[in-house]
Image (cartoon, helix red, strand yellow):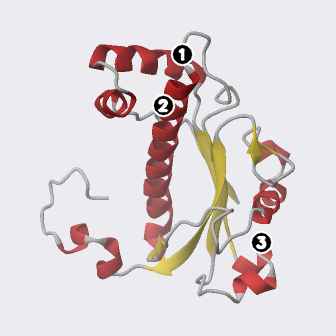
């Protein structure tokens, strides 16, 4: 079953953008207002056994867990080029921060998805990192099918063309208080971070 995660809020802190891009706060807010008109973050994923997606030599490399979560996230089909009045370097910084925000939101949703089963997502792997070759991008696109491709297409090198997006694979692990971080042992019941 493919799970769609959309819409995803565009969570870019204008103060962070101002600091990274050398802008005033007002300039950063104006740039983000333009970006919001062009960006439409979304994601989708599916839970499956590692051998359903990965070649046997990759499955043998590491402990994946019983299942993995594999999917795509994108900043939308219009994210590949900046609005006419934004410099390309500023657009690159906005999209970098926006993609990080999309991944943070997605990881939160993956934790919620797995929590009832007593599991949690392990460390994220992205095709192109040493443990996951770029060819996995094509396998994830085939797995999800064209209706869930988020309009991402592959280039000749195995990466994505056009808009800003990426494929991901998370092993699923048994939930543990140590892996869950400091919140797991906290007794505060009114904390907004509590899932």
Instruction: Farthest residue to the top: give it.
Output: 85
Q: Where is residue 174 in the image (x, y as percent from the top left)?
A: 46, 82
Disc 3 and disc 1: Cα gap in Å? 39 Å
Residue 39: name its quadrant: top right
Disc assigned to residue 86: 1
Which residue corresponds to mark 2? 94
Q: What residue sits 80% from the left and 55% below the top?
A: 158
Mark 3 or 1, which is nearer the eye? 1
SS of the residue under disc 1: loop
The kind of secondary structure element at disc 2 is helix
- Residue 37 x/y as whole percent: 55, 17
Q: Nearer the viewer, mark 2 or mark 3?
A: 2
Residue sitting at x 15%, y 60%: 189
Residue 187, by quadrant, is bottom left
Residue at label 3?
Answer: 53
Dot placed on the residue nearer the N-terminal end, 2 or 1: 1
Q: How far apart are marks 2 and 3 (CA)?
A: 32 Å
Report the residue at 67% width, 87% height from top: 61
């Amino acid at each position: 079953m493919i799970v769609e995660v959309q819409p995803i809020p565009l969570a870019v802190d204008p103060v962070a953008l101002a600091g990274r891009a050398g802008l005033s706060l007002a300039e950063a807010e104006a740039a983000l207002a333009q970006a919001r008109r062009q960006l439409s973050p979304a994601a989708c994923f599916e839970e499956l056994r590692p051998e359903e997606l990965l070649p046997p030599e990759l499955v043998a490399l590491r402990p994946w867990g019983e299942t993995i979560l594999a999917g795509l996230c994108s900043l939308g089909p219009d994210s590949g080029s900046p609005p006419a009045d934004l410099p390309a370097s500023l657009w690159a910084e906005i999209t970098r921060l926006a993609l990080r925000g999309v991944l943070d939101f997605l990881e939160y949703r993956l934790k919620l998805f797995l929590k009832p089963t007593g599991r949690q997502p392990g460390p994220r792997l992205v095709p192109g990192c040493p443990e996951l070759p770029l060819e996995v991008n094509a396998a994830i696109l085939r797995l999800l099918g064209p209706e869930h491709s988020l309009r991402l297409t592959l280039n000749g090198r195995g990466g994505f063309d056009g808009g800003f997006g990426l494929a991901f694979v998370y092993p699923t692990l048994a939930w543990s208080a140590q892996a869950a971080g400091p919140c797991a042992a906290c007794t505060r019941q009114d904390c907004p971070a509590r899932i």
